[in-house]
Image (cartoon, rainbow, N blue to C red):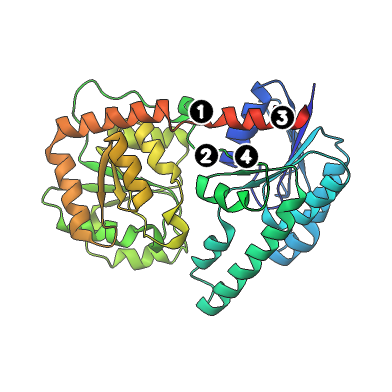
Amino acid sequence: MKKICHMSSVHPRFDTRIYHKELMSLKKAGYQVVLIVADGNGNETTADGIEILDAGKPSGRVSRIQKSRKTVYKMALQQHADVYHFHDPEMLPYGAKLFRKNNPVVYDAHEDLPRQILSKYWINKPLRKFLSFLSEKFENYHCKRVSHIITATDFIRDRFKKLHPGVSTVENYPVLSDSLIESKTDTSKASEISYVGAIAQVRGISELVKALAHCRNDIRLNLAGNFSPPEYQDELRETEGWRKVNVIGFADRQKVRELLQRSFAGMVTLHPIINYRDALPVKMFEYMAAGIPVISSDIPLWKEIVDDAKCGLCVDPLDPVKIAEAIDYLYEHPAESRQMGLSGQKAAMEKYSWEQAEKTLLNVYVDLIN
């Protein structure tokens, strides 16, 4: 049995992309799977048969960069794996070390790091540009020293293709067995819409709450996720429309299923910042898989997906009135909304599911091992 070692000094052990998608797919394909993390929760073998080794939780960001990644690397060496697969840009120099020892090594680029840094609101703008420049140089230099690069979107893939011959897109689509919800046989839904994910200003939540005050109908919004920063909730409390918000907090998979089942639309009206323009928002595909229409930002890539699937409406995410008009339209046209939901569900099953994306992942492993 071939042995696969995944490594991260940043992500939690049950990270959705790493554990519930990639590792579970590899395990089901017959590989022995080991995951090395640095979260301080100890070693364990999960009920899925995946071994998790803990490098210990770092005391801070500096400790993570200076110590944790080195510890993770040393633990990985002891595994004598057939393939090493790491998930953090700061692990790139250690990925190169593993590669120099004639090991097949995969770098998994979850996000476009340089563009992501440009959206970090807590870093002042001049420093953001400088750090973005440095991060791109760092990634570009080290990414040439691995066997293969996996990216979460085609946009990130195209950037790395200029630097490395082996690059594949493994989209972060939802696992249908987890996300798919049987739609109701009638068109009735509660007068609720839902947003699932991190709750931050840049994700359009302020405009979404304001939109509730402009709706002709009495619509309530379910906010499922954690506020970032926590003080943002206090700011939202002063926003007109807040009285129509249900604060759910963190929601597990079962809770998300329940919320989406009673909602007549799923909201993904994120601001059109550079970090989102070429991203594939997982929540949008989860709404589609759940069989409910999407109200999305009119970012060109997202609009193309929504229009092609005929699964919802696209609006200016900075305009609460336009958002309210879309909410009212879907609520007042239940038959059309249901058809949008069914169309989105069909597209999710045929194009936008992890079951489709995992084929690429498994093919990469077959090629590397052979």
Q: Nearer the viewer, residue 78 or 84?
A: 84
Q: Are marks 2 and 1 in contact (CB under 8 Å)?
A: yes
Amino acid type for the residue under numbered disc 4: Ile
* Residue under pointer 2: 171
- Location of residue 257 with respect to 227 vertically, above or below: above
**Inter-mark Cα distance, 3 to 2:** 19 Å
* Residue under pointer 4: 18
- Location of residue 5 with respect to 93 vertically, above or below: above
**Residue lying at 38% horizontally and 48% vertically, measured from the top left:** 301
If you read the primary sequence from the N terminus, does the residue marked by circle 2 or circle 1 appear first?
A: 2
**Inter-mark Cα distance, 4 to 1:** 16 Å
Amino acid type for the residue under numbered disc 3: Asp
Q: Is residue 91 visible?
A: no
Q: Quadrant of the N terminus?
A: top right
If you read the primary sequence from the N terminus, does the residue marked by circle 3 or circle 2 appear first?
A: 2
Q: Nearer the viewer, residue 321 or 134?
A: 134
Instruction: Return the x and y of residue 223 as percentages of the image width and height.
Output: 35, 49
Instruction: Return the x and y of residue 195 as percentages of the image width and height.
Output: 35, 47
* Residue under pointer 3: 367
If you read the primary sequence from the N terminus, does the residue marked by circle 4 or circle 1 appear first?
A: 4
If you read the primary sequence from the N terminus, does the residue marked by circle 2 or circle 4 appear first?
A: 4
Side (left or right) of 7 relative to 279: right
